Image (cartoon, helix red, strand yellow):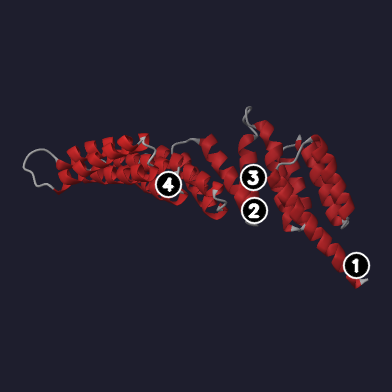
Amino acid sequence: MADLIAKGQDLENKAEKKISAWTFLGSKYEDAAELFEKSANSFKLGKSWDRAGSVFIKLSKCHLKLESKHEAAGAYVDAAHCYKKTSTKGAISCLDQAVNLYTEIGRHNMAARYCKEIGDLYELDQDIENASLYFDRAAEFFELVDATTSANQCKLKVAQFSAQLQQYQKAIDIFEDIARQSLNNNLLKYGVRGHLLNAGLCQLCRGDIVAITNCLERYQDLDPTFSRVREYKFLVGLASAIDEEDVAKFTEVVKEFDSITPLDPWKTALLLRVKEALKAKEMEEDDLT
């Protein structure tokens, strides 16, 4: 390891000297880029991740001097993957630079890919506001290259984050839109009930019983088979419990559904919000009587 790090340092020093040298022939930046790349890879092999990341950034700047934005973006991605080992912030910064460069040269598929990767990093860091922003950007880039499936996967993440941030209408709009898109696709139509369930749960969180009733009618119009599935009956049962302000009934409806179709943490969190609101209302009324 020590030998590899020493070799990396030696190559980096040589690259720096190339850049500072004055020369008639050849390109000092081409020569320096070759040395920086070898240096960064030597640091990687020596598991000196921060050093490798910093040299990949220097390599990127050489590529920019040579007006090669594609290679510069690739070097920023290599830097990010080194920084992932030590610094989420550093990785995100480098990936962001790569996204900007790929956008400038019209490589929207690559910009989409790395926007999504930034979103994943923010999600791991539990920063769902920034995660949502980057998944949203990724969806836009995927749409530019007609990668509809990838765009919708990113949009679904945005919908989930929006609901967590209590931006329920935004989440509802996304879930309903993807449900509409999926209806006429034989591969995707079986996911419609799940999208409508998610939209319905967001409606429940808003606490407007009239809106809940209206949305259930709309979902039946959108997909006539929806009224025959468990997801629809689950939403109807929850809406009935909310309308009756019956916490015990609400709990029983959730328990029954969960016993057959286990609820994921996202749905559980939303249902807990609804239940807490229902409990608060029940206590408020008890205080008045």
4 or 2: tag closer to the N-terminus: 4
* Numbered label attached to residue 164: 2
Residue at x-position 52% and y-position 49%: 122
Q: Residues within 10 Å of mark 1 (few under 14, many from 20)?
A: few
Location of the N terminus by quadrant is top left
State which tag comes first along the sequence, 3 or 1. 3
Instruction: Confirm whether residue 277 shows in the render.
Output: yes
Residue to which mark 3 is pinned: 175
- Give the camera-side residue of 31 and 280: 31
Amino acid at the residue labelled 3: Phe
- Disc 3 or disc 4, which is closer to the eye? 4
Q: Which mark is first along the chain, 2 or 3?
A: 2
Report whether residue 169 is seen. no
Considering the numbered disc 3 on the image, is that residue within a helix, a strand or a loop?
helix
Amino acid at circle 1: Asp
Distance from the alpha carbon under mark 3 to that under mark 4: 31 Å
Q: Quadrant of residue 52?
A: top left
- Point out the tag, 2 or 1, that comes first from the N-terminus: 2
Question: Which residue is at a point 81% across and 43% down the rendered structure image?
Answer: 234
Query: Given this view, does label 3 or label 2 mark the residue nearer the observer?
Result: 2
Query: Is 289 left, or right, of 171 in this rendering?
Result: right
In the picture of the structure, the residue carrying the numbered disc 1 is 286
| Between discs 1 and 4, the one toward the N terminus | 4
Left or right side of 16 for 153: right
Q: Secondary structure at mark 4?
A: helix
Q: At label 2, which amino acid type do we have?
A: Gln
**Dot placed on the residue nearer the N-terminal end, 3 or 4:** 4
Q: Position of residue 199 (x, y in %)?
A: 69, 47
Q: Amino acid at mark 4?
A: Ala
Q: Secondary structure at mark 2?
A: helix
